[in-house]
Image (cartoon, rainbow, N blue to C red):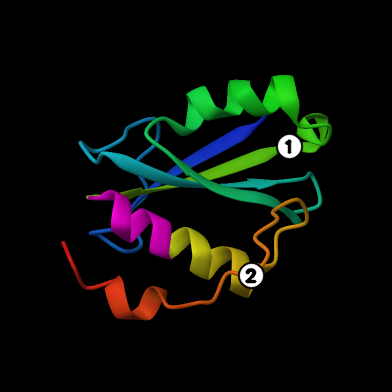
Amino acid sequence: MDGTETKYVDQDRPGTELPGKRAGMKYQLYRQFDKSGKLLYVGISLSAMARLLSHQLNAKWFYRIAKIEIENFPNKLQAQCAERRAIMMEKPRFNRMPGVQLRADVYMDQK
């Protein structure tokens, strides 16, 4: 995983990149990409980097991760809705969510 790129994005300020900072947000949605830019996995965590260590121990595809993008959300519900939307729309290779219906648009405006 040497050379992995991490980009933080503040959900409250679209287009704003926050290198190396969580900007005081609590929940993080992360996207893990391979070296060709293909999306491998989308998840949420209180600490995306700590969750990466779990993937290192448990995910057979961990060695493929070359880039990580992180978005911050003010609450768990918004992060969960964004995660479901991303999984359904972006179709990451290693996510599995059988039977999940996309209803995130109903909840995205709640704080």
Quarter residue 34 falls in: top right
| Amino acid type, residue under disc 1 in the picture | Ile
Q: Which image quadrant: the C terminus?
A: bottom left
> Pointers 2 and 1 in contact (CB under 8 A)?
no
Q: Secondary structure at mark 1?
A: loop
| Amino acid type, residue under disc 2 in the picture | Gly
- Tell me which residue sits at (81%, 52%) in the image: 36
Disc tally is 2
- Tell me which residue sits at (24%, 38%) in the image: 23
Q: Is residue 53 above or below residue 93?
A: above
Q: Which image quadrant: the N terminus?
A: top right
Which residue is tagged 2? Answer: 99
Q: Is residue 17 left or right of residue 63?
A: left
- As drawn, which residue projects farthest toward the left? 111
Q: Is residue 36 left or right of residue 43?
A: right
What's the mark number on residue 65?
Answer: 1
Q: Secondary structure at mark 2?
A: loop
Start-end of magenta stretch:
75-81
Q: Is residue 68 left or right of residue 64?
A: left
- As drawn, which residue projects farthest toward the front? 99
Viewer can see residue 1: no
- Tell me which residue sits at (66%, 31%) in the image: 4
